[in-house]
């Protein structure tokens, strides 16, 4: 943290602090210019762009297929869901179909991604509150098992580059499915243990209840999506609303919060992990045999007809959208990512005003951002 | 509600507004509405508040650059040269002026409907690049319009805090435009020690 001298703030007896870009609680290179009255926040302006590489321009210069590995690097904790969002947009643009088995594999890897993302997010949130080590290490122990599964499926732990237009890159073996089923079974035990440690923890409750409240109307108007929106009590989950893929076939609930504070946002993650476990059990039970990619789908040299498509999925962070315009050439004329991490930060200042500087760290942690996606 | 119905509803409720339907030729069949920039804030407020539509959630805001489009045609005409009729080929160039386009993807959270895609055009891409900001209607456009300003150079009038968001202060160009040329020091390949 660095104190900035600003004559205007000094006259009012306020202190200006530049939190970041190398602050350990900022989840990457992110900066907040905070103006403080004592310990209370009176103004907060986020500053972006430290990780900007113009992902969109790179993808517009590449072929449709060559953009997939770049999407891995958006939200680098959830490469599988990023792949899915992009593949879905191209499938809409080119009118491709996805075989049954591929849809099930997609659901399985996406829900595994959600498990490891939410577990990691809770771990980091507790780390930011000063519970250094234990919750994060518990979460990372489980995340490690998921990453091992991803590695044996796709060859890479984080940058999976796994999905293709009209399906997935390689089929999963029966052994992989058995291993996944074992992980899911074990994850239930982990969730019980994790909740016993945290949910009724006095320190967690004292630090998060009533902190960073996000009102319903503001949440919708500011485009907040994902667990942050549902913590404010709004029933909007794209797996139910759009029912993309085969989500319509699974029986699961959408957990909703009451108060919209940091504690509710924590609870959303825990409850969503339980629902993901349910989806995984059903998907692993029902997965059909058959082709894992549409044999007619063209990957190299794909030239969709001129037109445009917008596709969105429920990524662990919120609504991840891809907007593509084709002019009939082998690379997209316009390629746009709708980044949930960036748009969820719109309300950061609103949630932090009047809170103490120590709560800013907790509120930021409860939004769950990854800078690779914010800055693109 | 179909796009034709929405168009009709807008024309009856907002006198003088110009709305046209843009057909999308891809299999996604996501057609959109092109609206005029003078009435854009009024139309946006109507779309959000109308009880039939209730488009309360503006999900995606982005821009597209359409540079000047040059078309060359070869036209054969018959002319009389030296008393003999001959077929002469002429090439004609027609230039369609370019523009910048802002695209909004609107959804309804309470009705669980969407998307309604709304597009607004600037008159050209050099001198007159202003569009009305829709951030006062949907806060979610705040950072996304800043991004469109930063990378495409669309000036959103009425935006509460229109600054660069991803590029640094002092940067002058707009890198997402199709005719953007990066400075030579950005070409790392030519700078690499061989």
Image (tube, rainbow, N blue to C red):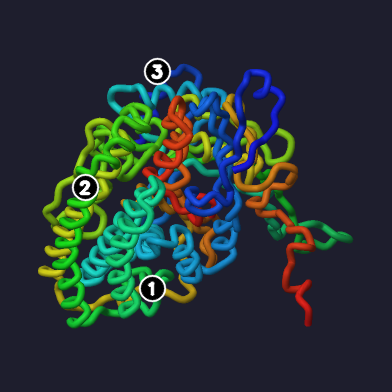
Mark 1 vs mark 2: in front: 1
Q: Is residue A152 above or below residue B58?
A: below
Q: Residue at x 46, y 63 (%)?
A: A71
The answer to whether residue B45 is visible is yes
Mark 2 vs mark 3: in front: 2
Q: CA distance from mark 2 to mark 3?
A: 33 Å
Mark 1 crowdedness (10 Å alpha carbons): few <14, some 14-19, many ≥20 = some
Q: What residue is disc 2 on?
A: A240
Are dots 2 and 3 on a single chain?
Answer: no
Q: What residue is disc 3 on?
A: B13
Are dots 1 and 2 on a single chain?
Answer: yes
| Among numbered discs 1 and 2, the one appearing first in the sequence | 1
Residue A282 picture location, percent across and down: 12, 63
Residue A354 picture location, percent across and down: 45, 25
For residue B85, what is the image quadrant? bottom right
- On residue B148, which mark appears? none
- On residue A157, which mark appears? 1
Q: Secondary structure at mark 2?
A: helix
Q: Residue at x 63, y 41 (%)?
A: A2
Mark 3 crowdedness (10 Å alpha carbons): few <14, some 14-19, many ≥20 = few
The answer to whether residue A88 is visible is no
Residue A213 picture location, percent across and down: 34, 30
Question: Are the residues tagged 2 and 3 within 8 Å (C-beta)?
Answer: no
Q: Secondary structure at mark 3?
A: helix
Q: In the image, is B74 to the left or to the right of A344?
A: right
Residue B68 picture location, percent across and down: 69, 49
For residue B137, what is the image quadrant? top left
């Amino acid at each position: 943290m660095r104190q900035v001298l600003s004559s205007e703030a000094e006259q009012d007896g306020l202190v200006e602090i530049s939190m970041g870009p190398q602050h350990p609680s900022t989840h990457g290179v992110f900066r907040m210019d905070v103006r403080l009255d004592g310990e209370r926040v009176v103004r907060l302006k986020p500053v972006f762009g430290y990780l900007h590489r113009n992902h969109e321009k790179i993808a517009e210069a590449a072929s449709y297929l060559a953009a997939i590995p770049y999407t891995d690097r958006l939200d680098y904790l959830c490469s599988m869901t990023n792949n899915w969002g992009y593949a879905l947009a191209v499938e809409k643009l080119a009118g491709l179909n996805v075989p049954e088995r591929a849809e099930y594999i997609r659901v399985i890897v996406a829900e595994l991604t959600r498990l490891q993302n939410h577990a990691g997010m809770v771990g980091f949130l507790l780390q930011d509150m000063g519970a250094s080590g234990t919750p994060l290490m518990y979460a990372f122990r489980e995340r490690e098992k998921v990453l091992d599964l991803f590695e044996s499926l796709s060859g890479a732990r984080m940058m999976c580059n796994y999905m293709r237009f009209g399906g997935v890159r390689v089929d999963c073996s029966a052994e992989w499915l058995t291993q996944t089923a074992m992980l899911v079974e074990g994850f239930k035990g982990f969730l019980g243990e994790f909740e016993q440690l945290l949910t009724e923890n006095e320190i967690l409750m004292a630090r998060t209840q009533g902190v960073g409240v996000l009102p319903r109307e503001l949440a919708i108007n500011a485009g907040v999506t994902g667990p942050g929106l549902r913590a404010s009590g709004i029933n909007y989950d794209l797996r139910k609303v759009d029912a993309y893929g085969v989500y319509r076939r699974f029986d699961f609930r959408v957990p909703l919060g009451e108060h919209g504070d940091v504690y509710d946002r924590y609870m959303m993650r825990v409850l969503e992990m339980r629902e993901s476990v349910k989806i995984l059990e059903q998907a692993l039970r029902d997965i059909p045999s058959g082709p894992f990619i549409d044999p007619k789908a063209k990957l190299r040299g794909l030239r969709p007809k001129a037109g445009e498509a917008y596709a969105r999925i429920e990524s662990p962070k919120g609504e991840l959208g891809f907007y593509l315009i084709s002019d009939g050439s082998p690379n997209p004329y316009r390629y746009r990512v709708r980044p949930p991490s960036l748009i969820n930060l719109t309300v950061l200042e609103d949630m932090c005003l009047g809170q103490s500087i120590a709560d800013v760290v907790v509120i930021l942690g409860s939004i769950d951002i990854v800078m690779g996606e914010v800055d693109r | 509600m179909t796009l034709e119905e929405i168009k009709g509803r807008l024309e009856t409720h907002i006198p003088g507004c110009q709305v046209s339907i843009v057909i999308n030729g891809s299999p996604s069949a996501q057609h959109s509405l092109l609206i005029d920039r003078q009435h854009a804030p009024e139309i946006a407020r109507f779309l959000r508040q109308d009880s039939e539509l209730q488009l309360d959630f503006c999900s995606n805001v982005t821009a597209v650059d359409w540079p000047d489009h040059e078309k060359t045609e070869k036209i054969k005409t018959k002319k009389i040269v030296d008393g003999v009729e001959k077929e002469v080929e002429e090439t004609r160039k027609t230039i369609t002026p370019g523009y910048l386009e802002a695209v909004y993807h609107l959804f309804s959270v309470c009705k669980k409907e969407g998307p309604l895609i709304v597009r607004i055009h600037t008159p050209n891409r050099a001198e007159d690049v202003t569009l009305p900001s829709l951030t006062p209607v949907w806060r979610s456009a705040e950072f996304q319009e800043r991004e469109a300003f930063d990378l495409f150079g669309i000036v959103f009038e009425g935006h509460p805090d229109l600054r660069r968001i991803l590029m640094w202060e002092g940067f002058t160009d707009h890198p997402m435009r199709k005719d953007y040329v990066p400075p030579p020091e950005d070409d790392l390949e030519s700078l690499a020690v061989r």
